Amino acid sequence: MNKHAISYLTYPALALSAVLLTACGGSSTNIIERDPIADDDHDDHHHDHGDLGGRLLISEHDDDHVYVYDVAHEEVIAEMHLDGVPTALYATPGQRYGVVVRGGDNGQVNFVDSGLYWEDHGDHGHMHEGDPALLELELFGDRPAHVTNGGHRTAIFFDGNAGAPAQVKVVNDHDMSATPALLEYSANQHGAAQVRSSYLLSSILDHEEESTLPNLVGVYHRHDGIYELEETLDVGCPGLHGSAQNAHHIAFGCTDGVLLIEEHRHDNSRDYHAHKISSEIRIGTLFGHDHLEDFVGVGGGVLYRVATEGEGSIEPINWTGEADLPVVGSVDSIVWGDLSAVGYAFAEHGELFVILDNHGGLTVLDTHDWDVVGERLQVTHSHSAPDGLRFEMTVSGDGHFVFVTDPAEQEIRVVDIEDREVYDTFSLDFTPNKLVWLGVVTEEDDHDDHGHDEHGHNDDHDHEDEHDHGDEHDHDH
C-alpha cells in the first residue's frame, strides 16, 4: 500500500540498470533494475508537514551485506557485499552518505553514497537521483567505537588495543575524496571526540588506573590535516564515556555528572571553557540538538534532562508513567517492570524526543517541558525481538517520519510522528538489523536523527557556515 506524495524530492524518470560495481578490498555493489517513479499527484495522501522520501541503508542480521531501500518505490535498489559483518550504521552530517562500521580489532569503516544530492544554484536548485555506490574511501583501525558529527565533518574514534594506540579520523562530507584528518594518541583508550570546525575536542587518558576510560578533555586544532593539542581543559571527567554537542556547548559524560564545555568564538579562533554539572549519577550516553540548550543523558537505564542554564542541573525524565524514579544523587537501581529503552532520536526540528522501547513501542516527549505527549504507540507487530537482535529506528531528514525495524516479521514500520500513527509498512526478504535514513535535507530540515555518539550523532548544522569562516582553513604555522 503506497501512501506517499513526493513533493520535496522530485525524481527524474531514471531507471536503474542491473550492474555489478566492484570496490576495493573485495567489496561489491549490485544495482537492481527498477522502473521509474510514476508522476502521480497523490493528492489524497498529501501531508502538509512533509512527504515521505529518501533511502534507507539497512544491514542484514549476521551477514556481510547491506541494502539500499528506496522509500518512494518501496523496494531494495542496491545490495552491497562488504568484507565483514557491520556492527553499526550512521549518516554523515549532510545525510547523503552512510557510514558502515565493522567493529572489533582490525576494524573497518566503509562509506555508502545514497545517490541523492541537491545541486544549489542560489535562487533555485536541482535534486539529483543516481545509483547508490560503495565509495573507494575505506578506513582501517582497531576498535572503531564512536562516530560523531559536527558541522560537515564526521569523527570516527578508534579505541585501539594493548598493541595499537587510539586514533581519531575525521572525514569531510563536502569532499569524501579528501584524505581524512588525523589525531594520533600514544596509547589505547575507550574515548570520544566532537569536531567543531577546525577544532576537535577529544578525550585524554591521564591516570594510572587499569581502566581505559579517559579522565580529561583536550582541545586540538587542525594543521595540515593533523590535529595538534592546544590545551587540556582544567576540569576533569573521570570515567569519561559518551559525548554530544549543540549550537553553543559540548558535553561529555562522567562518573560524577557531565562535563559541560562552552564555546566562545573570535574572528580567527575559538576558546573553550569547562565546568562540571556534578551528580552522583554516572552519565554514559548523551544526545544534543542545535535548537535546544538542554542535553539528554542516559545513566543506568534512566533518562535525564541535562540543563545548561546557570550552573546546570541533571534531573530524571519520567517517560514510563512510573512514579518511582530516583531523585538526583540516588544510585539505587530502579525497576520499571518489563519496559526499557533501546533507541532514542530527536524529531520535528528538535521539538520532540522519541524513545523506542524493547517491546517495539514509541513514546514521545515534548522537549519544551520533557513531558510525555499522548500515549505510547505500539509500532511493531512483534512484541519482542529475536535473540541477538533488538528493535532499531531512524528518523527522516525532515524529522516527520520514524522508521522502526521488526526483525521477527522482516518488516520496517513507518510512523508519522506528528499524527502518532503507523503510516506504512515495508516488507523485506531478509532480516533487518541496523538502519539509517539517507537523502537530501534542506535548510528547513534539521537533521533530527542526530545528537549523540551511540546512533549517529549529531550536530548536523554547519556551525562555521552559520557564524564565521575565519578559523575553518588548515593552519600552516
Image: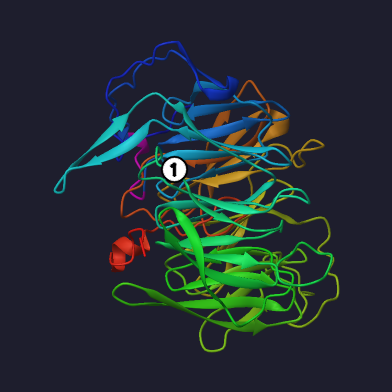
Quadrant assignment for the C terminus: bottom left
212 drawn magenta: no
Is residue 321 among the parts visible in the rendering? yes
Is residue 419 among the parts visible in the rendering? no
Where residue 117 appears, x then y in whole percent?
33, 37
Q: Is residue 443 above or below residue 114?
A: below
Give the total of numbered labels.
1
Where residue 121 appears, x then y in whole percent?
17, 43
Q: From this viewpoint, which residue is outermost toward the top? A: 18
Residue that label 1 marks = 179
Q: From this viewpoint, which residue is outermost toward the bottom? A: 310
330 horizontally vs 77: left or right: right
Q: Residue at x 75, y 57 (%)?
A: 340
Q: Residue at x 43, y 56 (%)?
A: 460
The front one of 286 and 341 is 286
Q: Residue at x 44, y 33 (%)?
A: 113
